[in-house]
Amino acid sequence: MPKLITVFEDRYSLEPISNEHRMELSSLESIWGRQNISFSVDNRVLLRKYVGFIATPSLQLQILPKLYEDAASAEDFEEEKRSSVRMLFRLLASSGFPSVKDIPEPQLIAAMNGDLLEIFIHIFIKRFLELFQKQIHRQYEDFEGNLAFIRGRILFQRQLLRNGGFKHKHYVSYKEFTEDNLLNQIIKATMISLRTLTKNEENKTSLSHALLLLEDICPIRLTESMFQRVRFNRLNEDYRPVFELAKMFYLNRQPGVHAGDERTFTFLIPLNQLFEFSLYQWLDKGLSSDDWVVRYQTPQRYLDAEKEVFLLRPDITIACSRAGSDTPIEMIVDAKYKNPISEENTRLSESDVYQMLAYAVRYQCNRLFLVYPVFRANKYFQNPLATYLIHNGNQEIRISALHIDIASEDLDQIQKEFIKLICHFFES
């Protein structure tokens, strides 16, 4: 079994990796882009942009969001790993990510040694067993073939071609209410593949138990088209989360390599996109009403509309719904998953501020927000981190930088405080 390698996004790994793993990681540049993967002279790896995992027969790698600017010791590393895994699941759940609603308890994270793949397997098999105990999924499936008795309807043309003068056979077409259907076949095929990858004894036992329950389901070789053929209705809607997890394991939710390779599982999502979409969901839930409209990455406009160059795509825009169809943008929120202030740099990035200024000019918006995560041991935790007042003719543009402690266990309270901050700085 390959050793689990854990790295944090945008930070060099704590330990060097083997030459074999270096070669395999180099072959995955098409996922991250060459600019987002690099190696130090002592074979430590740095991966940017994505978080998640890649599991192959020879490599098991997980990339987690960092919570500290640097990990100073092995103890810090283990603590950050456990906290980061739990935070990642909280973000996935709060962002409405379709496959992930469960937030693993600290005990489960410890039992799985902070292994993302093992935690996903545990969630997948636990959901299935709970559903299977309540109700076995059955549905009507079309069958046809030679039977010694008439069932359904006789296919006369095929009867003549296949059976000729044999009167004891009947070529028929019929429907059968069965558990041997495509959805269960996909779930079983996924379990068989996962059983070859898991190292956790509890997961192995649960997968073996589930496969025993699905003993009468025909084994299949998965293809992408099979997932596209599954349709949900009132009979199988409860199985949608399990199906989505199986689909995630097989197809991945982001473009990558090895899609459809039954020996390889990938789950990679852009960290900054996950952060910004989580903020959007919070704002949409907390502000959307008869007065406010919250939009994600719209409207998009060119900075130079005449030449159609420099396309602007703000993360989140908030407009006043009472203005009718010609809705002015009242606030713009941009998320940045990085540490904006450190001991070496006590000012915000100039490029971040210039980006917001471009939004202000093009969208005629005077209230703009830069939002960053709180990094542990950061001495500069305060809100706002910084405020910039820029005069544009008779207007005053206010750019506020905020910190959000997304690693907090009480994420609901953090969301409420975030909404209050936005409203407070809008009105001030």
Image (cartoon, rainbow, N blue to C red):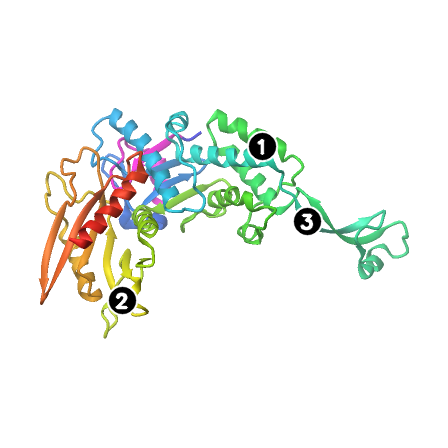
The N terminus is located in which quarter? top left
Q: Which residue is mark 1?
A: 210
Q: Is disc 3 surrounded by few (<14), some (14 to 19) or many (20+) residues within 10 Å?
A: few
Q: Is 394 placed above or below 41 here?
A: below
Q: Tell which circle, 3 or 1, labels the residue nearer the N-terminal end.
A: 3
**Would you identify the image quadrant in which residue 118 lies?**
top left
Question: SS class of the residue under badge 3?
Answer: strand
As drawn, is 78 to the left or to the right of 303? right
As drawn, is 205 to the left or to the right of 88? right
Q: Which residue is mark 3?
A: 140
Numbered mark located on residue 54 in the image: none
Q: Is residue 353 magenta?
A: no
Q: Tell which circle, 3 or 2, labels the residue nearer the N-terminal end.
A: 3
Q: Mark 2 is on which residue type?
A: Arg
Q: Is residue 19 magenta?
A: yes
Q: Is disc 2 surrounded by few (<14), some (14 to 19) or many (20+) residues within 10 Å?
A: some
Asked whether the viewer can see residue 38, the reply is no
Residue ranking furthest to the bottom: 306
Q: x, y percentage for residue 342?
A: 13, 40
Q: x, y percentage for residue 44?
A: 26, 36
Question: SS class of the residue under badge 1?
Answer: helix
The answer to whether the residue labelled 1 contacts the one labelled 2, judged by CB atoms less than 8 Å apart, is: no
Q: Which residue is mark 2?
A: 301
Q: x, y percentage for residue 327?
A: 28, 66
Residues in magenta, as a range: 3-28
Q: Mark 1 is on which residue type?
A: Ala
